[in-house]
Image (cartoon, coloured by chain):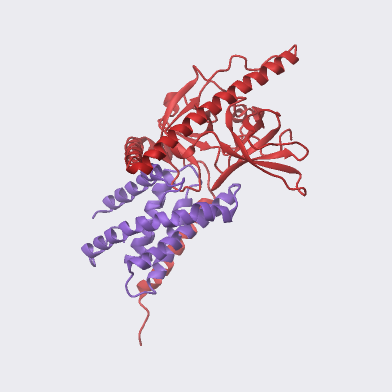
């Protein structure tokens, strides 16, 4: 895998996030594919590798959004770091552990987005936003994680000890 | 003695450094990033259009499975009919109210007598949303090449959608009226009471700054007031579904259900023949009207 391929693959994930997944919303909520990819990779390969993936995916998302540049990158990098730290506490991450981390990462990412929104002068009630946006997104993200984690586990097994681009 | 591997220390520092750098970028954020975003939009727009089309088709394909889904479709159709009739009724009421005012004011002169949506609209397709469902903005596939400019109002046949905030060569970003940073000057159609419609993350928007001594009824129609110069007068916005009144507060608020269903938005109209005065005077991009109570300086 070349660095270019990695950048393009994460770019495709970002494009799916802004174009395809919003069309598949449930009650106005849609999943966060790049977040799930980064968290799954952090569980499989650790914080450092996942932080680089988070940086690339985050930059793509920031380029495809209209808000403060860096907001999505920040959320993804923090989630990657936390997931990587959590992965160190278990011998081998299972799908159940991945689902728990998907939920934690969704809350962290949602919290960062709301904090940035609040800093930008946005008006919202945090409990309502948590109940109506973040909690449904957790459920949706867990479904995505059921697909993403096995896929990235296969990539991890296939590449073995080989260092992936930019790692 | 066992020594801690050096790589472990790097693992701890790497993300922290990145987080600090990104946080610095966020805090020092400027709008100088428009050029890279323009290039990104230009390069990725065809793919975004394809992906959105695939998403819409996938959604409609999964929507016709089973009887429940058929009923849901039928319900959606009926809801659309009801919404259209509501809007038609609303427009008729608006015309009637205008007639009454014109009769009472002998020397009435409308500042924009020839204003019409027709002849000044460009149709755009929605190709992307924000990466997070907490933020409510859309990307449409028309931009400065099609005569789109920042500040132009965006509508559908059902009512107000939002306002153009960022314009690229072949795409434009629209801030929806349900976004938590959106403020729109509005009024109640029957009482002409002025207020500001504020979007709220995860909730229906609320019409704020309504005087405590005025009666507001559930079902009252909300339209744009035209104050602040961001939107033309009389564009349908929604209907009051709940009134929040608290004696210790200076104003009461009304929760509004919008006429436009933002979850199923596929095409929009950009009103190109309306000059937004707030844009001329350099209003901040997120602000779609004044931020304070109506009538405040």
Residue A66 place in picture, x, y as percent: 48, 42
Image coords of residue B115 (percent x, y): 58, 17
Q: Position of residue B62 (x, y in %)?
A: 33, 43
- Left or right: B296, with A100 as reference point: right
The quarter holding residue B45 reads top left
Residue B144 lies in what quarter of the image? top left
Farthest residue to the bottom: give it: B1
Outermost residue, top side: B106
The location of residue B174, given as percent across then percent down, is: 49, 35
Q: Colour of chain A?
A: purple
Q: Who is closer to the viewer here, A44 or A63?
A: A44
For residue B199, say whether it is visible: no
User: Is A124 situated above or below B125?
Assistant: below
Q: The N terminus of chain B lies in which quarter of the figure?
A: bottom left
Q: How many marks?
A: 0
Q: Residue at x 33, y 35 (%)?
A: B46
Q: Is residue B173 above or below residue A136?
A: above
Residue at point 37%, 52% (across, down) = A33
Q: Quadrant of the image for the C terminus of chain B? A: top right
Q: Is residue B96 visible?
A: yes
Vertical arrangement, residue B268 with respect to residue B8, above or below: above
Please tell me whether residue B297 is drawn above or below residue A17 in the rendered image: above
Image colour for chain B is red
Left or right position of B222 against A149: right
Nearer to us in this view, A28 or B26: A28
């Amino acid at each position: 895998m070349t660095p270019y391929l990695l950048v393009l693959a994460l770019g495709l994930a970002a494009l799916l996030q802004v174009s395809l997944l919003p069309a598949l919303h449930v009650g106005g909520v849609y999943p966060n594919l790049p977040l799930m990819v980064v968290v799954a990779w952090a569980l499989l390969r650790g914080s450092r590798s996942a932080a680089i993936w988070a940086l690339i995916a985050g930059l793509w998302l920031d380029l495809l959004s209209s808000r403060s540049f860096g907001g999505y990158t920040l959320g993804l990098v923090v989630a990657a770091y936390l997931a990587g730290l959590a992965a160190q506490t278990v011998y081998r991450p299972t799908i159940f552990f991945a689902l728990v981390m998907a939920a934690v990462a969704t809350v962290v990412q949602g919290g960062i987005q709301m904090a940035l929104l609040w800093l930008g002068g946005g008006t919202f009630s945090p409990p309502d936003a948590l109940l109506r946006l973040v909690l449904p997104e957790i459920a949706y993200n867990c479904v995505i994680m059921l697909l993403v984690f096995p896929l990235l586990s296969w990539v991890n097994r296939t590449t073995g000890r080989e260092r992936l681009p930019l790692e | 003695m066992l020594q801690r591997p050096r790589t472990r220390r790097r693992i701890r520092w790497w993300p922290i450094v990145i987080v600090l750098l990104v946080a610095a970028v966020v805090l020092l954020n400027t709008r100088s990033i428009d050029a890279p975003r323009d290039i990104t939009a230009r390069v990725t727009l065809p793919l975004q259009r394809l992906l959105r089309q695939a998403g819409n088709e996938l959604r409609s394909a999964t929507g016709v499975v089973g009887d429940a889904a058929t009923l849901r479709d039928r319900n959606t159709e009926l809801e659309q009919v009801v919404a259209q009739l509501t809007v038609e009724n609303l427009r008729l009421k608006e015309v009637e109210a205008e007639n009454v005012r014109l009769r009472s004011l002998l020397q009435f002169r409308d500042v924009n007598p020839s204003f019409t949506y027709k002849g000044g609209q460009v149709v755009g397709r929605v190709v992307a949303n924000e990466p997070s469902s907490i933020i409510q903005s859309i990307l449409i596939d028309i931009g400065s090449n099609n005569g789109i400019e920042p500040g132009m109002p965006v509508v559908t046949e059902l009512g107000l959608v939002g306002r153009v905030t960022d314009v690229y060569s072949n795409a434009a970003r629209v801030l929806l009226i349900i976004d938590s940073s959106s403020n729109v000057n509005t009024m109640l159609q029957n009482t002409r009471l002025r207020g500001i419609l504020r979007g709220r993350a995860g909730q229906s928007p609320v019409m704020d700054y309504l005087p405590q001594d005025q009666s507001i009824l559930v079902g009252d129609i909300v339209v744009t007031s035209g104050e602040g110069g961001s939107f033309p007068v009389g564009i349908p916005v929604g209907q009051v579904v709940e009134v929040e009144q608290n004696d210790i507060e200076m104003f009461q608020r009304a929760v509004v259900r919008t006429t436009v269903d933002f979850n199923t938005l596929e095409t929009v109209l950009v009103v190109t023949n309306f000059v937004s005065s707030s844009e001329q005077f350099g209003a901040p991009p997120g602000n779609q009207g004044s931020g304070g109570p109506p009538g405040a300086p």
